[in-house]
Amino acid sequence: MKVTKQNIGTHSRDTRSLIIATLAAFVLSACAESTRPEATGKGRVRGINAVTTSPELIFLNEERSQGTVNYRAVLGFAEWDDLSYNFNFDVLPEGANESQRIATQPIDVIADTDHTIVLAGSLANPTLLTWEAEEREWSGTETVFEVDFFHVSPLLGEVDIYYAPEGTVPVLGNEIATMNNGDRIPYREFTEGVYELLITAPDDPSTILFQSSALSVPPAERITIGIFDTNPSIVAPVDVNIIFDGSAVQNLSDINSPAEIRLTHASFGVENINGYFDDDFSTVVFSDVAFGESSPYSGLSEPETPFDVALVSAPATTVTETDVLLLKNTRRSLLFWGLPGAHFLRPLIHDARPVEFFAATRITNVSTNLEFMDIYIVEPGTVLDDNVLPNFGGAIPGISTEFFNPGLGMLEFILTMPGGKTPIATPVVLDLASGDVVDMIIVDTADPAVVELRIFESIP
């Protein structure tokens, strides 16, 4: 009995201690809860990727992914309680299992306020630009819209910005502002109408560096115009995007830099060819293009342009024709391919740009001898057995992989018959580095059972 009483007493003391500890923890928790900030409203935050060589980045609030944002693109506005957060830009490098942090920006979200974070510079040496703007409540009866501007083009440097009704001649003193890399012009009101954006040399309105096509913005709308570095995927000397409130973006073309197109001869055994616009056989646009060659680029300005191809030996006889639609601010190749009596023109848009951490490759099949083929991308020396599957199976004539990331380092590109393991073309070995862009085509050879994989454009 004595032992039993002692056990009961000990248990009672333990219970009292537990109750006291629980009450203390509750009191401390209540104190901590009373000092924690409480949200009083919501603000909005968006992230913009302005790194010219950037792949798609992950935009995060703390460690919560909000999605991906590509170059010149935007993610948000998204609403957040008016508390403090760290917003992050991450990248997932080639072959990595975990993302890599590029930059972090603390934001104290303010209620009824729009916050913008722009990642600029390079991924190795990033810079962050931030600004705030009070949210605008529209009634729907307004006849005005608002525009703000930001400049993140170190290549462009200092410029004057004009934004005025279409046809307005820029006059010194009428510029919106003089801007340099890293500058922003806050929102300004403009009466609804059709406007042009002009970028000129500083204090020299006669030196126009960029002139947009006509812009029509509906009233009761906010837009942001961003000025970025140019890149090989466009023809304009300046890269300009309109960023809308709902995350949509629109790239602006320069009316003084027409879209460009060229002719590539990819039909084996066919003599040299000429190319003509508008059924005008008296004016050769693309002259004497041999098999495997590409002509220089020529500008396009009409919405739709008839295009004819003729043999050099019969310049007035069309062997194939098409209507070329205008795609502003782009470069394209027209691949002439096929067999006599059944020639085609395969358009390819050159929309790749060098990006960090990745390479880009495109393979377009313009061979006619074989109905299908498989494409393998492997490490050099890999034996193609039943355990090795093609990266692209059953490639038909005229099909393109479009640009994709094949990996980095030494890679061997092998073509076989469907399900086969014996090469039907001399393999191509490439040592791919970050930023490389390689465009390849598959063409016929003198042997109907053999094709050729050849590079017709690469960057750098």
Image: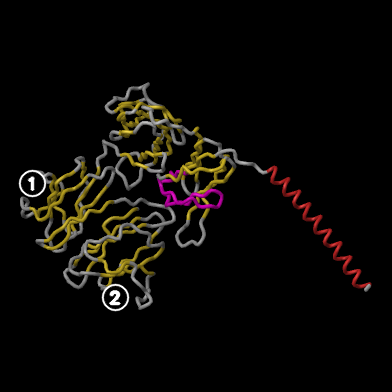
* Category of crowding for the residue at label 2, using alpha-carbon neighbours closer than 10 angstroms: few (below 14), some (14–19), many (at least 20): few
**Alpha carbons under labels 2 and 1: distance apart:** 46 Å
Tell me: residue 94, above or below residue 140: below
Looking at the image, residue 186 sits to the left or right of residue 403; the answer is right
Q: Quadrant of the N terminus?
A: bottom right
Q: Position of residue 447 (x, y in %)?
A: 17, 71
Q: Residue at the spot x=63%, y=41% of the render? A: 38
Circle 2/circle 1 CB separation < 8 Å: no
**Going by the picture, which residue comes out furthest to the bottom?**
386
Q: Earlier in the sequence, mark 2 or mark 1?
A: 1
Q: Position of residue 445 (x, y in %)?
A: 18, 67
Query: SS class of the residue under badge 2?
Result: loop
Tell me: residue 17, above or below residue 163: below
Q: Is residue 426 visible?
A: no
Q: Position of residue 246 (x, y in %)?
A: 41, 42
**Going by the picture, which residue comes out furthest to the top?**
173
Instruction: Give the colour scheme shown.
Output: secondary structure
| Number of numbered tags placed on the structure image | 2
Q: Residue at the spot x=40%, y=58% of the render? A: 433
Looking at the image, residue 89 sits to the left or right of residue 366; the answer is right
Query: SS class of the residue under badge 1?
Result: loop
Q: Is residue 428 visible?
A: yes
Viewer-closest of 37 and 65: 37
The label nearer to you, 2 versus 1, is 2
**Going by the picture, which residue comes out furthest to the front?**
1
Tag 2 residue: 419
Mark 2 residue type = Gly
Instruction: State which region is magenta.
Output: 47-71
Kindly indicate the quadrant of the structure image that contains residue 94. bottom left
Instruction: Inspect the magenta stretch and tell me whether residue 104 lies in it.
Output: no
Looking at the image, residue 285 sits to the left or right of residue 333; the answer is left
Residue 281, label in figure: 1
